[in-house]
Amino acid sequence: MPLLLGAIADDFTGASDLANTLVKSGMRTVQTIGIPPDDLELDDIDAVVVALKSRSIPASDAIAQSLEAYRWLEGRSVRQTFFKYCSTFDSTDDGNIGPVADALLEAAGGDTTIFCPAFPENGRQIFNGYLFVGDVLLSESSMRNHPLTPMTDPNLVRVLSRQTPHKVGLIAETAVSQGAAKIRESLNALTAGGVRHAIVDAATDRDLIEIGHACRDLKLVTGGSGIAMGLPDNFRAAGLLPNGIQADALPPVAGHAAILSGSCSEATRGQVTHMQGRVPVWQIVPDDAVEKGVGLADDILDWARDKLGETPVLVSATAAPEQVRALQDRIGRDEAGSLMEGILAATASGLYARGARRIVSAGGETSGAVVKALDVRALRIGPQIDPGVPWTASVERDPIALAMKSGNFGTADFFEKAFGVL
């Protein structure tokens, strides 16, 4: 059976965010970890989201991985392709959003596409091409201090123009507010003028749905998860997607509970603080991490042995920006990230061996390291915990329940709430 929608996401939590949106809109969705194996069974599946770890790697590598994912989807006769990136447009002036979009658009045979990372429910809105995070411009938000992709320019037309040789235009809110037909008309006019990429304003969920409807005939759509709210309607209108399906059903999962937090975002720092005194917490100390390396996981697992159960244990590498910078200055930016990811990945593997089957991970890089350590190939998408963050269950016979949270997502009590939802 041909896939209706095939998505390529540049990190693992973003993939879950998109898959969550599709499930809420009635599409039965599987998220794969990396390029899927050829023997992956896709019975009764409408959409596949291929989760890559390509946001912060060299652009040439990101392009190669994304094209490999596209070829896999193309082999399943996918009807439309979606390139998912972060709602804060995380990218340096060299990429990777522009270069990957250029490569995918060429592979798909399209002549134009849109870019819309807006997610109003989580405070991401675009007006006149400027991205707002909550009440402030992107450049005034905590993203200006991101250790890998600091975002210091809120104008997405300018940001994208520095990443692509093609013309970049804008479809402003004045057109978006008039609905899908006007959006299509505006996009056609831009295309006729030689524009290949169009930033699209969005301030409300209604805007996002209309943008999704306007993308009906595009071979490639790019954006955050928000515009995916309108895409299932296109397949439904064409008679390809049935109504009345419970798309978020998951098998029951029993086992110990654990939280692995590697994100250093402001939201995750607050979530870790909330759990202090509520659950057992191991805070990774940079000096210990540098001294012991991945071997620190053995100490963590010894500590967790008699604490595992229904109540989760929390292992945290989350730290304030100045602490992160100090470690990066000491051993190097990439080395610091790899060190913490390695410790958390080894911890995840050890916790699984000790019976942990319900695991929450915080941070895109952390989540990528964790699922690889657990050798998870694909995940069925289940119920939402907070906007953009669902529970998932691995497709293996002995399923693991996983919730992979983007660093900036979730309420202060997210970790506590997650296990209640499950």
Image (cartoon, rainbow, N blue to C red):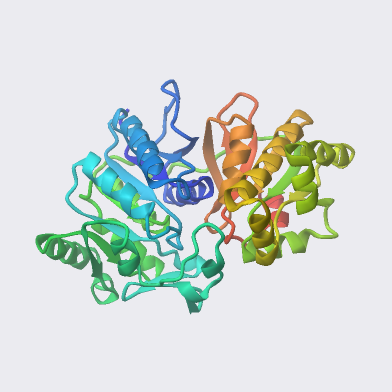
- The residue drawn where x is 42% and y is 55% is 225
Residue placed furthest toward the top: 39
Q: Residue 133 placed where, x, y %?
A: 49, 72
Q: Residue 420 placed where, x, y %?
A: 71, 51
- The residue drawn where x is 77% and y is 38% is 297
- The residue drawn where x is 45% and y is 57% is 86
For this view, does 211 lie left or right of residue 146? left
Residue 144, compared with residue 387, is above or below; it is below
Q: Quadrant of residue 299?
A: top right
Observer-nearest of 18 and 149? 149
Observer-nearest of 360 and 232? 360
Number of numbered discs: 0
Quadrant location of the N terminus?
top left
Residue placed furthest toward the left: 192
Is residue 7 at all visible to an observer of this figure?
Answer: no
Q: Quadrant of residue 142?
A: bottom right
Residue 259, compared with residue 208, is above or below; it is above
Is residue 107 at all visible to an observer of this figure?
Answer: yes
Q: Residue 53 placed where, x, y %?
A: 49, 43
Q: Residue 419 placed where, x, y %?
A: 71, 49
Observer-nearest of 25 and 285? 285
For this view, does 329 lie left or right of residue 15? right
